[in-house]
Image (cartoon, rainbow, N blue to C red):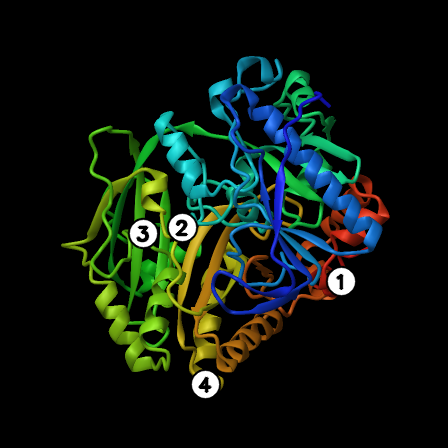
């Protein structure tokens, strides 16, 4: 490497039960290791410190291979599903937060953008902190989930959806990945059709340059199974503001037309015929007389803007459905339709004449980072052409089959992803989110919804980071077709058999992805 004497560090905590962020499951693990970069790094030593951590991670992979121990990197633990966890060793990445500036000499002469467009960071940096760093540079991420407490690698690896109806998911702004794929092998991976990094940059991190569209699109959403994602290159854009309006609207034919085709002509939106940047809905299945709508418009950045403020309840201007439902459940663990409706009416008070309004950057607008009680959540992706039939079917299951759903329904829209197993697969993807109590009745409701979609031949995918326990090889192949085989072949290309075994978990085995 570079002859540096810098040493990365690790602190082991021993065997334990790991509980995820939203407290909906526990996983027994053999050990939890907290990773740290070398102490006291100077600005001129950032790459040396980064490379020292690479060497440590390679050693940990070697130990796992030699002892036949399963290994996984741990982000913020934001996932509701067991996709990211293992019964072996978890490596906590929270302290791996280096973000070296991308200099012009680090950028390929064939890159379509400018060096200022690129942001490189280590795997443990949270989206919250990326937003803060970029805002100082008058830059912005292209996409964010509704929350930003996830690490960047955790968010992209599970296919976290974005927020713009004409934009992609989080992983779709990623243009380079540093993958440690074995005890002695690590690669800088990017698309052949979209070169980004120069050989000088690749040399600085001591990796092997690999440009391949299929490999890259496979690795983007691979939920920790393509080795250790140590670094990420993001493509950013100039900073902007989001002007947000949120208020109740009748669930009528005009609203159904908007859901069915993103046709807003009958909704009389705040900016008239201007197409919104963001359109999302929250529905109370216990009362569908009206639905709560949020629209946002992209505006030029104003350094004197007043950022959105938190309400007295602790909820922010654009808290996601999970944040709201978590607070409801924490306050009223025995959730009933009456209680649900009362909370819903109290939270969502904006009207067309007096909408809830705010202006802020992407990071200021989507800033939910706190957990508010045990919560269950699943999210399905369907084609825009199936959005309204799918929603109506879910409401019918709630109305006609068994116990009522103790929760709420969120609806949002994003463009398709290039990631082979990204769940936002459809040209225009409608994401339908069901958040509710951690309870057997919720599990039963999810099962009935999935079964009903299949019976009605409505094609759907499932968010990797949310409840998806019905996934098996047959369902997975129905969702992703030949992309499954291309993904499996890519994994075999990048990782040898012993390393693949180290980065395999029970979920991969159940889904037929452990080959």
Q: Residues within 10 Å of mark 2 (few under 14, many from 20)?
A: some
Give the residue number, with chain letter if any, for mark 4: 403
Q: Residues within 10 Å of mark 3 (few under 14, many from 20)?
A: many
For discs 2 and 1, the disc positioned in front in the rendered view = 1
Say which of 154 and 8 sits in front.
8
Say which of 89 and 305 sits in front.
89
> Disc 4 versus disc 2: distance between alpha carbons?
32 Å
Give the residue number, with chain letter if any, for mark 2: 262
Q: Where's the C terminus, which quadrant?
A: bottom right
- Name the mark on residue 509: 1
Give the residue number, with chain letter if any, for mark 3: 318
**As drawn, 173 above or below 347:** above
For discs 4 and 3, the disc positioned in front in the rendered view = 3
Q: Quadrant of residue 312?
A: bottom left
Counting residues from the start of the chain, the first of labels 3 and 2 encountered is 2
**As drawn, 407 above or below 364:** below
For discs 4 and 1, the disc positioned in front in the rendered view = 1
């Amino acid at each position: 490497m570079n002859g540096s004497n810098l040493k990365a560090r690790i602190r082991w905590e021993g065997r334990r039960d790991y509980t995820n962020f939203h407290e909906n499951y526990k996983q027994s693990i053999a050990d939890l290791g907290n990773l740290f970069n070398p102490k006291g790094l100077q600005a001129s030593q950032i790459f040396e410190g980064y490379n020292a951590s690479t060497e440590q991670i390679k050693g940990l992979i070697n130990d796992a291979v030699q002892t036949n121990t399963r290994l996984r990197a741990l982000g913020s633990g934001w996932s509701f599903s067991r996709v990211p966890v293992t019964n072996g060793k978890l490596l906590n990445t929270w302290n791996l937060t280096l973000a070296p500036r991308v200099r012009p000499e680090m950028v390929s002469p064939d890159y379509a953008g400018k060096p200022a467009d690129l942001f490189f960071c280590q795997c443990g940096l949270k989206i919250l902190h990326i937003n803060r760093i970029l805002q100082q540079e008058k830059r912005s991420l292209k996409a964010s989930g509704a929350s930003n407490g996830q690490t960047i690698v955790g968010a992209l690896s599970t296919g976290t959806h974005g927020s713009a109806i004409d934009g992609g998911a989080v992983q779709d702004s990623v243009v380079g990945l540093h993958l440690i794929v074995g005890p002695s092998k690590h690669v800088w991976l990017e698309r052949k059709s979209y070169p980004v990094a120069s050989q000088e940059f690749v040399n600085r991190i001591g990796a092997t340059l690999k440009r391949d569209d299929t490999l890259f699109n496979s690795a983007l959403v691979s939920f920790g199974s393509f080795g250790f994602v140590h670094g990420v290159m993001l493509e950013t854009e100039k900073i902007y503001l989001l002007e947000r309006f949120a208020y109740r609207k009748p669930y009528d034919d005009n609203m159904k037309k908007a859901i069915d085709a993103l046709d807003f002509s009958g909704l009389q939106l705040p900016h008239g015929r201007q197409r919104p940047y963001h359109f999302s809905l929250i529905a109370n299945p216990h009362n569908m007389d009206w639905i709560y709508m949020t629209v946002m418009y992209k505006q030029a950045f104003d350094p004197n803007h007043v950022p959105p403020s938190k309400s007295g309840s602790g909820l922010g201007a654009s808290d996601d459905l999970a944040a709201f439902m978590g607070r409801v459940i924490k306050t009223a663990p025995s959730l009933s339709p009456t209680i649900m409706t009362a909370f819903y009416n109290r939270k969502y008070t904006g009207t067309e004449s007096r909408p809830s309004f705010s202006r802020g950057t992407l990071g200021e607008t989507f800033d939910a980072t706190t957990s508010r009680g045990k919560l269950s959540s699943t999210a399905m992706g369907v084609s825009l052409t199936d959005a309204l039939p799918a929603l109506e079917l879910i409401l019918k299951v709630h109305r006609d089959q068994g116990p009522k759903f103790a929760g709420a329904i969120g609806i949002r829209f994003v463009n398709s992803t290039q990631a082979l197993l990204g769940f936002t697969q459809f040209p225009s993807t409608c994401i339908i989110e069901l958040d509710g109590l951690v309870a057997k009745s919720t599990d039963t409701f999810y099962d009935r919804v999935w079964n009903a979609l299949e019976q009605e031949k409505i094609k759907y995918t499932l968010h990797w980071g949310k409840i998806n326990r019905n996934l098996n090889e047959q369902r997975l192949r129905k969702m992703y077709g030949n992309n499954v085989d291309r993904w499996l072949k890519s994994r075999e290309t990048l990782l040898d058999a012993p390393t693949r075994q180290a980065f395999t978990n029970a979920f991969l085995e159940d889904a037929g992805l452990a080959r």
